Amino acid sequence: MSRSRIALFIFVAATVTGFYFAIQAHLNTAISPRLSWWRASGVNFTYYYLWALTTPLVVAMARRFRFESGRWATSLIAHAIASAILTAAQIIAGEAILTLLGIRYMHAFWSIVRFSFAANFQSSLPTYWLILFAYLAFDYYVKYRDRELRGAQLTAELSRAQLQALKMQLKPHFLFNTLNSISALMYTDVDAADTMLARLSDFLRLTLDRELDQEVTLHEELEFIRRYLEIEKVRFEDRLTVNVDVAADVEDARVPTLALQPLVENAIHHGIATRPDGGSIDIRAHRNRDALHISVADNGVGTHGEEHPRERIGLANTRARLECLYGADHQFSFSASPAGGFIVEMVIPFHETHPNADR
């Protein structure tokens, strides 16, 4: 909050308080003769505007003598002394102003001051403590909000760092597998290895030339998969079939960048590559209310009879990225496919808005 807004708030609070007590004094039938509105408002507005002016001093004392462990007794004594001094100063200054305004009689100034001390000191003293505790409450709220904001920023930075680390881990893994495939082809089909190397070069140029966001549209992710499959089809030729079944209403849905590539790569290298006759991969996506369902299934060698399939690096990376991006608002599972092979399924929140669109 800016200083001007704080000053305005203090002024309004003093005005409202002064007005409230002025009405009380004006309507108080126990006072005889009855106070005129001029005198009642003059006294109360003067006193509470003076407290408004001394608020910076109370705040300074609050900052200097905080109620913290090990020093609360010292702070309590300091504030008790300060409250008594400021209350006394406020009464003297208030009576001086009221005298100059003609509300008090000049010749009886000190008598009126003594009367004001006797009548008003005990009722005016708590004002110091009200201002003090109001400031402490506000200060606590601001610090609590700042801690929450810093915590959220740190969490976001940590998530970004984790996602970046996972991406950096994914790229060498992909390169290792692809270069290993090229190396194998060099002994059997040099032309195919050369074509695969050229397509890998194009694929890497596409990757490096653009700044990858945390999320892209499903259409963009599928285009990325198509480029990747162009590399793999050089090696597998007709032994690899890919079927894509994506509903038209989800093509603009946003998905994590490189979310499908490691799943397709796993299906090829751990499911289809070892089969002499190759196999097929089915990529499906559809919307169910506020959720986007995506699956990657193959008809490869499956789980080799394992009851609990091992989570390889591609699956582990994908699970970690979904956890960073969506927390508990996602599902990720993999298992043997009923038709043979292996299936990976993910369910993430459906949204089409870029996360930075409103910034």
Image (cartoon, helix red, strand yellow):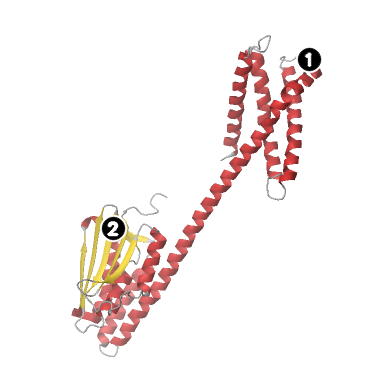
Q: Secondary structure at mark 2?
A: strand
The label shown at residue 18 is none
Marks counted in the figure total: 2
Q: Residue pushed farthest bottom?
A: 187
Quadrant for the N terminus, please: top right
99 and 306: which is toward the camera: 306
Say which residue appears at 30% left-offset and 69% top-offset.
Answer: 334
Q: Residue 191 lies in what quarter of the image?
A: bottom left
Q: Position of residue 271 (x, y in %)?
A: 26, 78
Q: Nearer the viewer, residue 223 or 149?
A: 149
x and y percent of residue 188 in the render? Answer: 26, 90
Q: Quick one: which residue is furthest to the top in this view? A: 33
| As drawn, 165 above or below 353 | below
Up/down of 180 relative to 296, above or below: below
Secondary element at tag 1: helix
Above or below residue 58? Residue 340 is: below
Mark 2 crowd level (few <14, some 14–19, many ≥20, 10 Å Cα):
many
- The amino acid type, in three-letter code, at marker 1 is Met
Q: Which residue is disc 2 drawn over?
A: 292
Q: CA distance from mark 1 to mark 2?
A: 83 Å
What kind of residue is marked 2?
Leu
Mark 1 / mark 2, whichever is N-terminal: 1
Q: Residue at point 67% right, 23% down? A: 46
Taking the image as shown, residue 175 lies to the left or right of residue 86, namely left
User: In the rendered image, which residue does mark 1 sit on?
Assistant: 106
Residues packed near mark 1 inside 10 Å, few (<14), some (14 to 19) or many (20 plus): few
Give left or right: position of 72 versus 296: right
Residue 174 or residue 290, whichever sits in front: 290
Which x, y percent locates residue 278?
21, 80
Inspect this view and state whether residue 212 appears.
Answer: no
Give the image quarter of residue 245. Answer: bottom left
